[in-house]
Amino acid sequence: MNADNFKTLVVETDLLILGGGMAACGAAYEASYWAKKNKQRVTLVDKAAMERSGAVAMGLSAINLYLGLSKGNNTVDDYVSYVKNDLMGIARKDLVANIARHVDSSVHLFEKWGLPIWKDEEGNYVNEGRWQIMIHGESYKNIVSEAAKSALKELGEDGAYYERVFITEPVMYEDRCVGAVGFSVRENVFYVFKAKAVLDVMGGAVHVFRPRSVGEGLGRSWYPPFNSGASTYFTLKAGAEMTCQEVRFVPVRFKDSYGPVGAWFLLFKSRATNAKGEDYMEKRSSELENWAPYGTSKPTPANLRNYLMLLELEEGNGPIYMRTDEAIQKLVAEIPDEKESRRKMKELESEAWEDFLDMTVSQALNWASHNIMPEETPSEISACEPYFISSHSGASGAWVSGPKDLAPGEHHWGYDNMTSVKGLFAAGDAAGASSHKFSSGSFTEGRIAGKAAIAFCVDHPEAFEISEEQTAAMKERVLQPLKTFQEHHAYTNDEDVNPNYIKPRMFMFRLQKIMDEYAGGASVGFKTSGALLTRGLEYLQFMKEDAEKLAAADLNELMRCWENVHRMWQAESHIRTMLFREETRWPGYYFRTDYPRMKEDWEAFANCRWDPESGKWEMIKREIL
Ligand SMILES: Cc1cc2nc3c(=O)[nH]c(=O)nc-3n(C[C@H](O)[C@H](O)[C@H](O)COP(=O)(O)OP(=O)(O)OC[C@H]3O[C@@H](n4cnc5c(N)ncnc54)[C@H](O)[C@@H]3O)c2cc1C
C-alpha cells in the first residue's frame, strides 16, 4: 500500500465529538439541540459503525444506573456514598452527583426510543440490584445510536457523522485543542477535523495487559477490543491533567468466556464458594476490617470481594464456583405450589440464558459445549486481566471541571466536563474520578459535556488556521508505519520478522508481557512493587523507541499500529501513577507488596500530566474536597 497515495480531507465544524459510543451518542443528542438554537455545527467521528461500536456493541441485559428519583426509591446522596465507598474513598462527589441527578431522564429517553425494559405487574421497572434495572438489551446500542444520528440529521448541513475513521492525534493551537487528525480504515483518506471545541469520548482500554485468553482464545476479553486507550492518549498529548490513572478494573467473570455475574449475584442471589463449598466472603470476613472504613461498609467494595477470592486461590482452594445450581433451586423451593414452582423454574432458566444471549453469547456457547445446565451444575468464575474503564468500576481518565452548583472551589473552571486544556472536553470512560456511571451514566455525562461544549463554542467564536506545513507534518507522522513497511518488507521472506521494523501484533505482545509481569497482571496475582514498576517503566522507554519502527502492510494494520501507541501511553501513565501512590488501596485490583496497607495521607487523588513542551511528566497529589 502506497503511503503517498492518500487524499487529505479537511472538515470544519464547531463541536467535534470523537467516538460513537454511549457518551458520544448522549453528546450528539444533547449538543444537536443546543447547536440548533445557537447556529453551531456538530460532527461525530467513530472508528467503527455506531450501531455496534464501543462497550455496548453486543448489547446489555441490565442498565446499571437508575435511581428512580421520582418514586423516591433512592437519593442522589445515596448514590454518591455508594460510589465513594466502592472506590475506597477516591471519587469526585460533584461529578458523581451531577450524573446521578440527571440519569433517570436518560433512561426514560431510551424507553421512549424503543428499548424494552422489564416491568412488574404494577408497571414498575424490575430491579436487578438497588441501582440496576433489567432490559431486553440485545439492540440497546442500535436504538441509542439511531437517536443520536437522527439528532445530527436534524441539523441538516450543520450536523454530520463519520464512521470507520480512526482518530490518532489532537490538533493544538497554542494552549487550546482545536481539532483532531485521523484516517479512514476503508479508503486512502487522511482527515483533518477543525473545531472550536473537541469532546473526547473514545472509551477505555483493553489489551494493555496480557489477557488470560491467549493462543486460540486471543481476542476474548471482558472489555471490547474496539477501545484501545485512544481517550487517554488524546488527552495526555493535548497536555491535559489526568486523574486516577492507577485505578484499573479487574472484573470477576465466568471463567474463559467472560460472561457477566451481576444477574447471578443480584437477581438470583447466588453464592460463590471455593472448591470445598466454603463461602469465602463469610470465611474471610475479618480481613475486611483491615480495609476499614470501606471494607466494613455495605456493600463490600468490588476490589475487596476480588481480594478475598484471590486469597482463596493463593491457598490452593480453587476452582472458585458460582453456585448457579443452588441459587435457582432455592428460589424455586420457596414456592409451595408444584405447578407454579415448575413454571417459575422455566422462567428462571430462560432469564439465566437470556442474560448471556443479550450481551455475551460466548457464555451460552461455553455452557452448551461443556454440558453445563446452570440450574444443575455450578460454573467456574475467575478474576480477568486488568482493564481501564472509568465508567464501570475503574476510575482513570481526564481531570474535568465539575458543575458550578456542586463543585467545590478549584473543581470548577467554567464549563462542565472541560479538561484542564481549553476547548477539550471528556466524558464516559474518558473522564476520571466519577466511577460507576455505566451505560446510562456515560450517556448522561455525554449530554452534560455536549451541552457545555456548545456553550464554549458560542463563547469562543474565533477561528484558527492550521497551516499546510502542520497538516503535512501530521499526515507524514500518522502514515509513517505504511512507509516503513514499504521500504523494508522485501528484506526478509517472512513479513512478520524483519530487523528494520516491528509489526503491531508483536508490539502488542511485548507491551502486554511487560505490563503483566511488572505492573501486576493476572499471571503474578495482581502484585507489584516499586522495584518492579521502575523496571517496567525502563522497558516502556525502549518500547517508545521501538514504536518509531512500527510497520503496517495495510489500513487495518495502520490502525493496529496506532492502537498500540495509544495503549503504550495508557500503560506509562498507569505505571507512573502506581509508583506515585505509595500504598495499597485497592487490593484485588492491584497490591503493592512494598506498601501493603492503605495510608491516611494517600486519601487523595493521584494525578499526572505530560507536558507537550518539555516532554516531561509531572505527578500531582490533589486533595479530596
Ligand atoms: C463487558 C462490559 C459489560 C458492561 N455491562 C454493563 C451493564 O450491564 N450495564 C450498564 O449499564 N453498563 C455496562 N457496561 C458499561 C458501559 O458499557 C460503559 O459504561 C459505556 O459503554 C461507556 O461509554 P463510552 O462512550 O465512554 O465508551 P464506549 O461506549 O465504549 O464508546 C467508545 C467509542 O469510541 C470509539 N473509539 C475508540 N477509539 C477510537 C478512535 N481511535 N477513533 C475514533 N473512535 C474511537 C469506539 O468505536 C466507540 O464508539 C459494561 C461495559 C463492559 C465493557
Image (tube, rainbow, N blue to C red):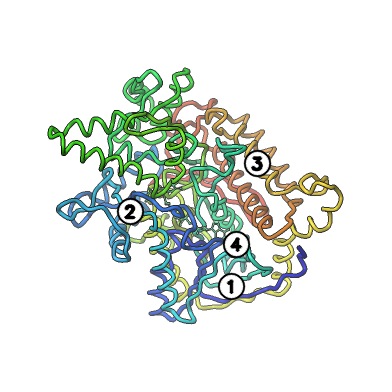
Left or right: residue 354 versus residue 170 is left
Q: Tell me residue 452's x, y (percent).
A: 41, 67
User: Mark 4 and 1 residues: CB-CB less than 8 Å, in contact?
Assistant: no
Please tell me whether mark 1 or mark 2 is closer to you in this view: 2
Give the amino acid at mark 3.
Leu
Q: CA distance from mark 1 to mark 2?
A: 39 Å
User: Mark 4 and 2 residues: CB-CB less than 8 Å, in contact?
Assistant: no
Q: Earlier in the sequence, mark 1 or mark 3?
A: 1
Q: Which residue is mark 4?
A: 167
Ligand 1 closer than 8 Å to label 4 CB: yes
Q: Residues within 10 Å of mark 3 (few under 14, many from 20)?
A: many
Give the amino acid at mark 2.
His
Give the amino acid at mark 1.
Lys
Q: Which residue is mark 1?
A: 194
Please tell me whether mark 3 or mark 2 is closer to you in this view: 2
Q: Residues within 10 Å of mark 2 (few under 14, many from 20)?
A: some
Q: Tell me residue 338's x, y (percent).
A: 15, 34
User: Mark 4 and 3 residues: CB-CB less than 8 Å, in contact?
Assistant: no
Q: Which residue is mark 3?
A: 511
Circle number at residue 136: 2
**Of 404 and 96, the residue lying toward us:** 96
* Quarter where residue 295 is shown: top left
Residue positioned 66% across, 68% down in the render: 187
